[in-house]
Image (cartoon, coloured by chain):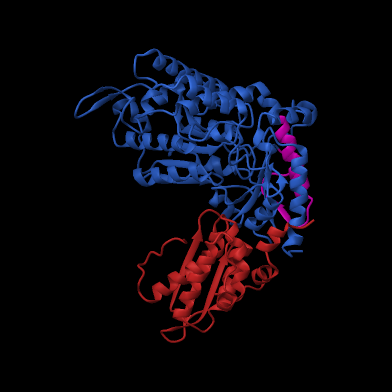
Chain colours: A blue, B red
Amino acid sequence: MPTPTTVMPPVPVRTDATVTTLTSADVERLRADFPILERTVNGSPLVYLDSGATSQKPLAVLDAERAFALHETAAVHRGAHTMAGEATETFEAARAQVAGFVGVDADELVWTSNATEGLNLIAYGISNASLGRGGDSSARFRIGAGDEIVVTEMEHHSNLVPWQELAFRTGATLRVIGLQDDGHLKLDEAAEIIGARTRLIAVTHVSNVLGLVNPVEDLVAMARRVGALVVLDACQSAPHMALDLRALDVDFAVLSGHKMLGPTGIGALYGRRELLDALPPFLTGGSMITTVQLDHSEFLPAPARFEAGTQRVSQAVALAEATRYLSAVGMDRIAGWEFALGQRLLEGIAALPGIRVLGPGLGEERVGLASFVVEGVHAHDVGQFLDDRGIEVRVGHHCAQPLHRRFGITATTRASAYLYTTEDEVDAAIAAIGDVRAFFGAV
Amino acid sequence: MTGSAALQGLYQQVILDHAKEKHGFGLRDGAAASSHQLNPTCGDEVTLRVHLGDADTVASISWEGQGCSISTASASILSDLVDDLPRPDVRLRIEAFRELMQSKGTIDGDEELLEDAVALSGVSRYVTRIKCAMLPWVALEHALLEADGALGAEAGAAR
């Protein structure tokens, strides 16, 4: 275990020889499960390189949602008829499936609308504890003046703004771990910041802009030494690599369904069992109570305590199917394929004149995405040029304004791959990016 | 290979030229009012100052900002257009430009009225880019309202 002041070297290089991966033939086969990939955009075959924003959905996922609606629709966790019972069983089986996919137990997984709601659930639960709700059992969550919440400069706004607001509400102080020029966290700075006042560390597992994988183990070790909680944003890791939240030893984590082949409107929050059982609820109302008096109520244990109101049942069922699909393909093979695609993309773009890629260089661990700046051409114009050839990428600040400010820019273009992305698509993007500067007269 | 005819229509040479030349760029002192407008989806921003001749005439605008070629060219074109122009005529042109941007490609724009700004007509076919082109025009609209004391301290977002 490293000492707090040790700066960890980058994650060791993975070589093709040691990595299981999908093959081009595998990818061609599984693309048949995603009919949308056959469409054209502006007269060209679609090259979808915006999976970091939202993934496409395979037929199995769409079919699962439709099958539930067609054959099983009924209210869950209420009603005593046969269909209510069946729907409840299906809903809870979906929870167990998704929980298993990330290495945790079913009763530690709370359904949310999205990852943002999951993060707000934690922040407002802590707020409510700080107001005294939850009594003695929630006392461990209370924060106030003199306490510190630690985030990083690379966080997505959804893992930054809720903590800013929590700090404002409670009087706690927000501390920020800065980034090195290559995008990696300054771990020596982290070791200085994380101390006796630290109550919570919120960090992303994989950066949605830099594509790098953060050293979660090191941050967890620092947190454990001072008794702070660790909240992991797993939105960009869960879709792309095998994830074992128990092994990572984080206290909370959030998932986004639509980035991992599932539908929109569904996400999940993992919380260590004893923490979820002690955290006061965020949204309150029906379905999360045991006894309701006119002037007060008693709440169910987790996860039901955090699931007020009618739940997203068909979406949960579809997300479970998405995780089954991913597991059947194999998360290690997906990660291997995307690592190779990411390296191909990085190598191709970095070789072009006047292009600056953010994040770690070739050979370092990154997922299959690259965010870059084209000298003399604004990201919006780059995106428009690529779109003209059917290449769909994300442009702008990618909900990470502070990260962009850190690197002295306002916007980047991001190409992000997934299991269905081919080498030819990456090459088409590289070729198009190579033509951008000439079109805009920037050479 | 370059872009398609549609893309060439969006990025006409006059737009690429304006995006490079940036007429009116650089904030000048002595403004009657100013406005800062931001496109929150992409982070593009413009700060625009309006310089009045007499109370009824816009002498010039000066501006600074960071943005794509569409928003940059739009600000440059606007700077040329409103140079020494009676305020009712400025208002007329802003309205005509807004109508052009909302036309989804159904009108070409009145070149006598809008001059180089008609080159931006292609933008109206790209729903995600209309805000880019409108940004400096909305800033001018707000600056004029501010000059009249018709706006509070908080200017609204670009529309």
Q: Is residue A367 visible?
A: no
| Residues rendered magenta in the picture | A336-364
Locate residue B15, reporting x and y percent.
65, 68
Q: Is residue A44 magenta?
A: no
How many numbered marks does the figure carry? 0
Percent across and percent down for residue A401 are: 54, 52
Answer left or right for A61 relative to A373: left
Q: From this viewpoint, which residue is outermost toward the left?
A: A294
Q: In percent of the image, x 44 and y 60: which residue is there?
A: B157
Q: Nearer the viewer, residue A359 or B91?
A: B91
The image shows residue A363 at horizontal and vertical percentages of 75, 39
Between residues A298 and B88, which one lies in front from this camera angle? B88
Which image quarter is the N terminus of chain A in?
Answer: top right
View extreme (front): residue? B106
| Residue at the extreme top | A82
Quarter holding the C terminus of chain A? bottom right
Q: In this picture, is B25 found above or below A360?
A: below
Residue B12, quarter of the rendered image = bottom right
- In this view, the residue farthest toward the bottom is B54
Q: Position of residue B119 (x, y in %)?
A: 63, 69
Above or below A424: residue A435: below
Drawn side of residue A72 relative to residue A438, left or right: left
Any part of residue B156 in sight: yes
Of residues A245 and A148, the one nearer the viewer is A245
- Residue B76 lies left or right of residue A131; in this view the side is right
Give the answer, above or below, for where A209 lies relative to B158. above
In magenta segment, residue A346: yes
